[in-house]
Image (tube, coloured by chain):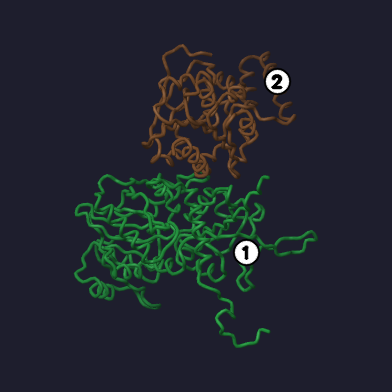
Chain colours: A green, B brown
Amino acid sequence: MATAPAPKTTVAVFFGGRSVEHDVSILTGLQFLDALDTELFEPLAVYIDPQGQWWCGEALRRRSSYPLSGEPEALGIEPVTLPVGTALGDRPGLMVARKGLMGRSKVETIGFDVAVPALHGSNGEDGTIQGLFEFLRVPYAGCRPLGAAATMDKHFTKRALGATDIATLPHALVARPGRGTFLSEEPVKAALDQQMPGWAFPLLVKPRRLGSSVGVAPAADMDALMAALSKAFRLDDAALVEPLVANLVEYNVAVRATETGPVTSAIERPLHDGPTLDFAAKYRAGGGGPKLDDGPGEGMAAAGRALDPDELTDAQAAQIRRDAAAAFALFDLAGSVRVDFLCNGETGEIWLNELNTIPGSFAYYLWQAATPALGFTDLAETLVREGQALSAGRGGSTQADAGGATLFNRG
Amino acid sequence: MADDRAPARFYERTLGQGPVEMVWLHGWGLSHDSLVGLARGFETRATNRLLDLPGFGATPMLAPGAGSADYAAALAAHLGPKTGPRVLIGHSFGARVAVRLAAADAAACDALVLIGGAGIRPPRPWPRRLRAWTIGRLVKLGRLAGPATQERLRRRFGSADYAQAGPLRATLVAVVNENLTEPATGIDCPVLLLYGAEDTETPPAVGEAYAAALPHGRLKVLPGFGHLDILSRGAHQCARHITRILDEICP
């Protein structure tokens, strides 16, 4: 007798978001949806627009639908909400208001089994949506709130790494001047003298909590430093100032958890002309804006790169892999995390720069080139299954009467 | 039509190095470029040979009117005998060539992958059949008005491929009228059939017909993809299915 096929797991992929990386997140989300094995999973697109409205609809799978304009409802795209102040059911669901037969509005539920945040930067990669999912007991893929929030904050990350033997660059944290005061040189110099004694130009300025190289700028002198800080303070309330690495070469590697511990992917050296890999080099490789409906070679996946480059010595590659895996374990991370390193190409010194817990394209191109190779469809399944297991194993019972701390008679 | 000229000089690009030889054959009007994204997923496992088929990209055309069997013969001469496990992957028109080659020589490959593979005409509803018949008659009548008028009618009512075929028009006419059901029945190796559910050029019905004809055909219909974006947006899912075939022939 033939057995009935197992029911498919509905995977809700959240992308877009209130972040400067909104557009890149669309590419990452759609790539993930396309990569899901449709024999096992039912993909569900959940788009968060720049104003924070959530949307569902099959047309969201097409890149040509963005940016949403006019009346999305005409394309079958409906506004949805995730109910917060209601009793928790067995299966999470999004609420949508639809018109019934007599034209009366009725609320329906779009159920799903697991959420995948494909949101880069603020309000998605920083532990906020992960916290919401935890609160609502929604199973989700990727890092838990603590690891996501800790690694989004570059200052906190470097402080934590400072307690290990993982090399990082020195830095100074400069806060945005209070309301009604202007940015001036003296307090900046004082912060640098105190936190980074012996500092010298050139320096690099980066916002404290943004990703994707947004707001990052080099500074060769004090005027440039003040300009770079002004720019960073438009995006964040604090900025890091670091020495600009001479003869800079960047290396990235992805890490994920397995039953036997963290494993690393192929190592990439991004190819770019400028002193640092800025947003344009990452996401607009080839010129112009991102191409539409054009397949896997897009977003971060389309940026030029050398994989496992020849100039990297065995010792350097080992350091990168060891430090990346150690940082992944330190912050108790999950999912596919890309760890970025800076290297002085002449001296060979290497410093861990930052961790990206939801990297562009989920860094599938690094796993695809790993030994053994892991395709994006396999990676997507791995991330979904890992997320389900992590959420299922979370904490203990939170029922009010579970700990014997009841005061009111429940009959 | 046999090609009695010198063997075709195929343009070939190689990606990766591995024990399995994967030969990638593109669709009509395309070149090896259309398959690079998908082939990249196999760089660590296989030696990927991406070819421009004759008349496309940088490979010179065969004799005018050459059919898929001529393409297969030219390809066999170019590839030579296999020295290890070999998989032929053909998209659309490339699938026709792959089917012809595997049917002609059982030792040519260990597995076939047809992506949106052409070669068997899908059943067409009667309005479309009537339209095709009417257009055919109209074009023939156009001959009375002179070659220029006939050409205008062909361009007006013919397919985009037909209008743009240029010197390959005779080949296009030859191959679209071929039915590869019979050759398919003689292919003894595993054949993976990947079709996009939204494909209107080679709809899943073509895959079903192949699956019925092939002794070892396995059909996978991928929801949400069409004839071309199955190679780009659908590449990751295709790669997963192809990997399973590789696991079978080269564990």
**Gap in Å between the C-alphas at discs 2 and 1?**
60 Å
The answer to whether tags 2 and 1 share a subunit is no
Q: Nearer the viewer, residue A192 or B193?
A: B193
Residue A238's x, y, as percent?
Answer: 36, 71
Residue holding disc 1: A91
Using residue A384 as the reference point, say whether residue A253 is left or right of it: left
Residue lying farthest front?
A: A1
Rendered view: B16 above or below A65 = above
Q: x, y (%) of residue A382?
A: 48, 54
Residue plotted at (48% across, 14% down)? B3
Q: Which quadrant would residue B96 be assigned to in this image?
A: top right
Q: Residue furthest right?
A: A102
Residue bearing the label numbered 2: B138
Q: Is residue B208 visible?
A: yes
- Quadrant of the rendering where the C terminus of chain B is positioned: top left
Residue A344: image location, x then y, percent: 23, 55
- What SS does tag 1 mark? loop
- Mark 2 or 1: in front is 1
Q: Amino acid at mark 2?
A: Leu
Chain letter behind tag 2: B
Image quadrant where residue B181 sits: top right
Q: Residue furthest top?
A: B4
Other-residue count near label 2 (Cα within 10 Å), few / some / many at <14 / 14–19 / ≥20:
some
The three-letter amino acid code for the residue at tag 1 is Arg
Residue A185, quarter of the rendered image: bottom left
The chain identifier of the residue carrying mark 1 reads: A
Q: Is residue A98 left or right of residue B158?
A: right
Instruction: Tell me: residue A268, above or below residue B16.
Output: below
Tag count: 2
